[in-house]
Amino acid sequence: MFANVGWGEMLILVIAGLVILGPERLPGAIRWTSGALRQARDYVSGATSQLREDLGPEFDDLREPLNELNKLRGMTPRAALTKHLLDGDDSIFTGKFDKPETSTEKPVSSPAPQPVAPPEPPATTPFDSDAT
């Protein structure tokens, strides 16, 4: 639940608690908060185990769509396109296309075409006195 809270954030929370509650009431507030979180965690785990006992094997059938939904939520647009539209072939995104098979036969040589020189620009720019 608080996996993303680091030591820096924890220090800020303790300093804010000292300023807001004061040093006399802060330990009691920390005890009350940790007890409430522990009790909520126990309720949730108890409800999960109760559902698992009541439903039996159907519980796993209920969890399967939720697991699939969690997989889709963590998927990037590129991964979703690759998986659903391209059947997992991501060569369109990586540029690693299949190379054509090379044959062992020697290709028939044809005369190489001569390069064509580009036309030379005119020496002077044409000027139209009526256009200006």
Image (cartoon, rainbow, N blue to C red):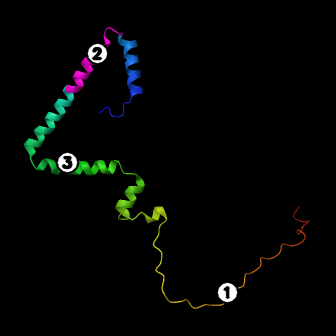
Q: Which of marks 3 and 1 is nearer the N terminus?
A: 3
Residue at (40, 17) in percent of width and height: 16
Query: In which image quadrant can residue 27 be found?
Result: top left
Query: SS for tag 3?
Result: helix
Which residue is label 3 attached to? 63
Residue at (28, 15) in percent of width and height: 29
**CA separation in Å, label 3 and label 2:** 37 Å
List x then y, in percent, for residue 8.
Answer: 42, 26
How would you rate the neighbour count of disc 3 (Cα within 10 Å): few for under 14, some for 14-19, many for 20 or more?
Answer: few
- The three-letter code of the residue at mark 3 reads Arg
- The three-letter code of the residue at mark 1 reads Ala
Which residue is label 1 attached to? 112
What stretch of residues is rendered in magenta? 22-38
Residue at (63, 90) in percent of width and height: 110
How would you rate the neighbour count of disc 1 (Cα within 10 Å): few for under 14, some for 14-19, many for 20 or more?
Answer: few
**CA separation in Å, label 3 and label 1:** 67 Å
Q: How many marks?
A: 3
Which residue is label 2 attached to? 29
Q: Is residue 73 left or right of residue 78?
A: left
List x then y, in percent, for residue 121.
Answer: 84, 72
> Looking at this view, is 22 or 70 the one in front?
22
**CA separation in Å, label 2 and label 1:** 87 Å
Q: Is label 3 in contact with label 1 (beta carbons under 8 Å)?
A: no
> Looking at this view, is 120 or 33 the one in front?
33
> Looking at this view, is 105 or 60 the one in front?
105
Q: Is residue 9 left or right of residue 104?
A: left
Query: SS for tag 1?
Result: loop
**Does 75 appear above or below 53?**
below
Q: Residue 131: say if magenta.
A: no
Q: Residue 30: say if magenta.
A: yes
